[in-house]
Image: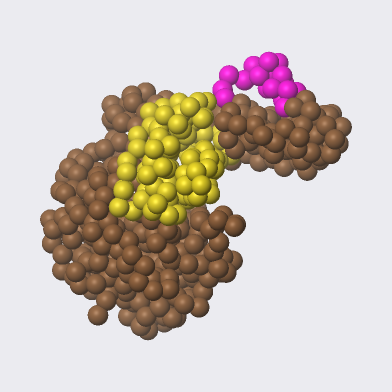
Chain colours: A yellow, B brown
Amino acid sequence: MRQTVPLRRVASARAGDKGNISNVSVWAYEARHYADIKASITPEALKAAYPAQFRGQIERFELDHLHGMNFVIHDALEGGVNTSLNLDAHGKSFSFLVLDLPVTVDL
Amino acid sequence: MALRIGCGSGGEPDQPGPARDLVERGNLDYLCFESLAERTLAQGHVAARSASPGYSRKLETRFRAVLTGCHDQGIRIITNMGSADPLGAGHATADLARSLGLKLKIAVIEGDDVRQLISGDTPLEGVGGTVAGFGKPLVSANAYIGAEPIVEALHAGADIVVGGRISDSALFLAPIMHELDIALDNWDRIAKGILVGHLLECSTQVTGGYFADPGYKDVPDIDDLGYPIAEVQPDGSAVITKLPDVGGCVTELTVKEQLLYEVHDPSAYLTPDVSADFSRVTIQSVGKDRVRVDGAAGRQRPDRLKVQVGFEGGYLGEGEIGYAGPGARQRAELARDMIHRRIVERGGFQGDLRLDLIGVNSIHATAVERSSDTQDVRLRAALRSRDRQWADRLVADVESLWMGGPAGGGGFRGRVTETVVSQPTYIDRELVQTRVTYIET
């Protein structure tokens, strides 16, 4: 049945940081969901969902054979781990912002 | 026979126990300790100025846990725990080895400290502008160096190799290059070694750390995570695994997540040793907690090395106080507004003052607010200033909320920390001269 669910139901994600750039990789649990995830979870979708958070350019790289994508989010970390006053200066929790986005898949 | 490389630490916080387990039961050939993050090195330089050691504070406890076992089994150790003082780390290691009655050859790699190559005109390519224009006193400048001097030291028979800003994955690449006799320009084979290093360099992040999400991704015995082992085959492919009797898991998904950790374009992952292409990497489960990886390719290494330039970052003042029960959020907001009025409006503070409500919006700040009905809120106030007085004043102002703030405020905590900030730049690799010296015990 085709259903709209949070991305967290069908994918995992991990965030990393380098300087003022965050990257969040997203991995489909099941190969059959990957195409739908790829169609829904775009740089535009991330920016639209979190306009105040993700103000910089977002690039997406795809590793189709592994059913994964990598989002590279520029200017995302308030200057980076050692200038930000944010408690989560690394943006470690960004993976769960992405996992909260809706995705329509065949469950 | 596969070459067996263990990860003894993936950062300064890692504890010595899992490394000792690997030495006792991992049948290792090499044990590599990664210990530097963007901030750690500049902090080492600050420590060294105040007569504390500039090398890792964990060096002695980690080496005390593993040195005898490594010596007895012929396991060679490679680390960047030398941080801001590789030679000091080498001598500390030698002192420890002597006190344990061990005869060891210790190689010290220096030359990553490139402060003499940095001037006010040096561009800062991350933020733009120059070192002088950044407007803060310079603390340190360290180039990310590659595997070459480690391979030289291993060739010379070193039992332990200690350096400073050796790039994380190079610590693991070096024994692969040495044992498999890989040439310095064999880009594909070097990239396969970098893939192994990249997967191991954050220790538990490939064995079930930074992974669990209850009900979605569960990790067995997560309170006892083991550190990873790579079994590297003569063709450069490898199996990532862990000890069978420790917690955690190595699955296709833990490996996938770590594959792109802190990677941007997977087809051009730049390291001092190679521009690695991970875009066709294969990841295949070949048994319980055994995942085979292969398929990395490489192109010529970059002509320039990344340099992390550290500056004095001023003083960070942080204060917190909590409110609970009915109206917790409104009382915390009142406390927040009081601090803003005192520090900014009446105090005239010009810098950034951050005021978060923990339990409402502290982590994602402006992204989303969902917990509006929470009855358990902490105000967190933070600022950074070159003048310590502002940091002290903020902490004192939050502390005064005990008695002079909204009703029921409790659990004040406050602290002032001297900070460093770092910014990347790049310099021609020919300018960075590494040298290896040996200490025999």
Residue B60, position as x, y percentages in the image:
48, 66
In this picture, residue A84 sits left or right of residue B38:
right
**Magenta region:** B336-352
In this picture, residue B5 sits left or right of residue A106:
left
Residue A25, position as x, y percentages in the image:
41, 46
In the depicted structure, whether residue B308 falls above or below residue B219: above
Residue B240 sits in which quadrant? bottom left
Q: Tell me what residue is drawn at x 80 percent, y 29 percent.
A: B331
Residue B89 sits in which quadrant? bottom left
Q: Tell me what residue is drawn at x 45 percent, y 54 percent.
A: A29
In this picture, residue A26 sits left or right of residue A3:
left
In this picture, residue B351 sits left or right of residue A25:
right
Residue B156, position as x, y percentages in the image:
20, 71
Q: Work out whether residue B363 or residue B381 is closer to the camera in this orientation and state it.
A: B363
Q: Work out whether residue B388 or residue B7 is closer to the camera in this orientation and state it.
A: B7
Numbered circles on residues, count: 0
Residue B184, position as x, y percentages in the image:
14, 58
In the depicted structure, whether residue A82 falls above or below residue B277: above
Of all residues, the one furthest to the front in this rendering is A1
- Determine if the magenta segment contains residue B341: yes
Of all residues, the one furthest to the bottom in this rendering is B72
User: Is residue B171 in sight in this rendering?
Assistant: no
Q: Quadrant of the C terminus of chain B?
A: bottom left
- Determine if the magenta segment contains residue B142: no
Q: Tell me what residue is drawn at x 38 percent, y 71 percent.
A: B290
Q: Work out whether residue B409 or residue B52 is closer to the camera in this orientation and state it.
A: B409
Q: Main secondary structure of the magenta part?
A: helix
Q: Tell me what residue is drawn at x 77 percent, y 32 percent.
A: B329
In the depicted structure, whether residue B110 falls above or below residue B139: below
Q: Quadrant of the N terminus of chain B?
A: bottom left
User: Is residue B295 in sight in this rendering?
Assistant: yes
